[in-house]
Image (spheres, grey):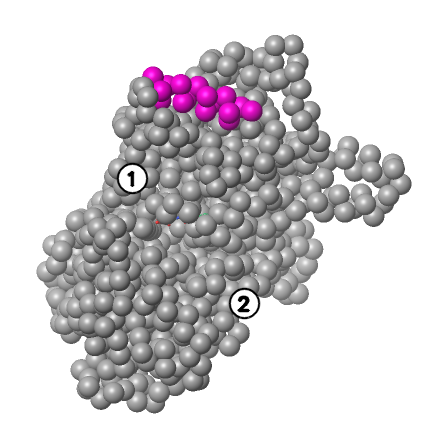
Amino acid sequence: MAAPDHTVEAFTWHFLHEINFGQGVDLYRASANDKYLALARTVRHYLAARWLVNLRHQHETQSKSVAYLSAEFLLGPQLENNLLAAGLEDIAAQSLANLGIDIEELRGVEVEPGLGNGGLGRLAACFIDSLATLNVPSVGYGIRYEYGIFRQTFVDGKQVEKPDNWLAMGSPWEIAHPENAVEVTFGGHVEDEGEGRRWVPAWSVLGVPYNYMVPGYLNGRVNTLRLWSAEATKAFDLKIFNAGDYAQAVRAQTFAENISKVLYPEDSTPQGKELRLQQQYFFVACSLRDFIETVLPEDYDLHRLPERIVFQLNDTHPVIAVPELMRLLVDERGWDWDEAWAVTQQVFAYTCHTLLPEALEVWSVELLGRLLPRHLEIIYRINEEFLEKVREAYPGDELRVRRMSIVAEQPERAIRMAHLATVAGHKVNGVAELHSQLLADKVLHDFAELWPEKFTNVTNGVTPRRFVRLANPSLSGLITEAIGDGWVTDLEQLRRLEPLAEDAEFRRRFREVKALNKRELAETLWVRDGLELAGDAMVDAMVKRLHEYKRQSLKLLHIVSLYEGISSGRVPLESVTPRTFVFGAKAAPGYVRAKETIELINAVGRTINEDPALEGRLKVVFPPNYNVTLAERLIPAADLSEQISLAGKEASGTGNMKFALNGALTIGTDDGANVEIRQLVGDDNFFLFGMTEPEAAALQSKGYEPGEYYESDPQLKAALDLIASGAFTEGDRGGAAGSIFSSLTERDRFMALADFRSYMDAQARVEEAYADHEAWSRSAVLNVARSGFFSSDRSIRDYLDRIWGADPVDHS
Ligand code: F58
């Protein structure tokens, strides 16, 4: 069936049809939610026609696909993106206007699928957008969590988590296929069988696929995102129901459904929880089976698997797919080990997203052996053969053998998933130049020495469709007027804006755009949270997960220091640049220090915001529940982007790219992709401060003494003392204030005080630069013009060239 016509009439017909027969109501009685669901399904009709054509074509041409395996896809709102990709923005707006419906109201009804924690999950969402836009046949595989990342609320300034019941009002973008459910088994034991081994599992669940369409931008390609939901198997039910214990049988269902119930809200320290391992195995087992048994033709010779697929492992969360594929080939298909290993190595590649040692996943052998006994055996064998190679390459170096082993012996016997991924994958990549360098030099040094050709870099990127075209329509309009609209799919074209940085009229219009975006942000924050900005002051934004290494507390010291200077009378109020400090950050629920930092930011914010002397000069706003929807409002309004992690800790960052592309200037350390941003936009258009990675490493090994900084810098001491005095916490010197004070002054792994002076100096340079509106907007325009490199389209092209060896296809 052909797609409905791209006309207002056809669109209206489908929309009304959906209202009447999809929602079962008359238009005059339809709620905003009815209209939203009908609108979404109407858009789906348009996409589905192309989707089916693509799937058929892919089947016929047997082209190579990319499977992006990721435990998280932080999609954000779908309606606007799908309207844009399908070329339906104007048609839908016209159609709804004719019916007297406000499309903005319907957008407001949409609940974003928050199926990710932060950068890693959002990157996966950007990547599937770019894969589709670049016409690469691909599928994203993940988990359909019933509850995504928690909804953050503040009670007395403290974070309180609420469940994210994103499915409650219906989920119009997904299509469930219970008939294609896959059975996944767990537990039990392993027996000898002839020459080989046989896994006799103890229990199983069903994985039900839910398909989402992933449209490319105006190119007619629609790829698939397939998310798995866990359900009880029929056999499992029957057995218990027949045994007569109804309640027990219902409980068993709940047990199975638990697997995809909730996204773990961790940011960098995986907890090693059994349910998390169940989630990981669940989704990769479903995905491998799905690809091999459903996507490939029935008689497909799996020796040729690498011709049809590459599985990209998004961090170590899907790495259990490696022994799973070995098991499918060796145990279930009777392949010889070496043959299976050769194929396995060719189809997997691994992306690492961290540098923090505590973020590297390990699974205790006890747990892995209990849940996946056959996989543990396979991992042991992979390790044996690998260590044999290490011994050959480095005879007598047993220390190295122990360092490199996939199996750690201390503090308990455990499987190091990053080692397994590195051994199995044909490529390993970091996510920014510095990160990839540090991976090869430090985190995975031994491996990079053994296999230098395996290691590569792919600097992250973000989709220009969502984060410029949709989030910032005014800037998009201005850009398009100047250079045409080719930039949306070829972001390097932004370079053509460079000469306009010298054009006073263009800069004036650029400032107008920023001012408009600020007004819209102010409106959003007022309606959403009752928060007010400081007039049209500088918007200084720090939005990212709350973590000590990202150093929100350093930002807080800057704010407290300004406040302390003003309130002590040392700094004349008129000399302070009016600013609104905007924070957005969720803390992992179990991360006490992070939650205390939130509490302290809110306490400082309350004090500053209530001080009448500071009215219109300084404001601190911390809207709760920072998410993709809010990011799209906030980033376009920002003047200053805070990227202040300790050098050598932030793998890349992607928020930093979004801000630069929307014309904010960065104040940042030489960390992650900041390094590349600075190189591209130029030192004059970036506020660099802080230790470099080698300097930070040297200080760490020499022994960091925070007290020295505290004692020797009066401004720093005054700010810290003010916090410790309880001035922001109603006289309470313990609690959050006491705890943050002592963590910064006694034993801070992330050495915030060591960078304080240089950060303050950089902030002074910011104030000076901001005072010259013309020069600032010149820099801001240059940030936009020179950040085209950070398109996720470029990242995907790099993956294609350096890792996947797959090509875009002509699917017409
Ligand atoms: C992030 N990692 C990096 N992890 O911190 C960031 O520098 C990078 O830009 C981004 O990945 C994309 O490459 C990250 O977001 C997680 O959220 C994990 C979720 C699961 C538990 C462990 C952390």
Q: Is residue 550 above or below residue 58?
A: below
Secondary-structure class at tag 1: helix
Q: Assess whether residue 387 is covered by the magenta stretch.
A: yes
Q: Residue at x 20, y 56 (%)?
A: 691
What is the x, y in percent for residue 398?
A: 36, 26
What is the x, y in percent for residue 54?
A: 48, 31
Choose mark 2 or mark 1, whichever is in front: 1
Magenta stretch: dominant SS?
Answer: helix
Q: Foreground residue, 82 or 741?
A: 741
Range of the magenta residues?
377-392
Q: Residue at x 41, y 32 (%)?
A: 419
Q: Residue at x 69, y 55 (%)?
A: 24
Q: Assess whether residue 233 is covered by the magenta stretch.
A: no
Farthest-out residue, right? 244
What is the x, y in percent for residue 179?
A: 68, 33
Q: Is residue 727 above or below residue 213?
A: below
Mark 2 lies on residue? 160
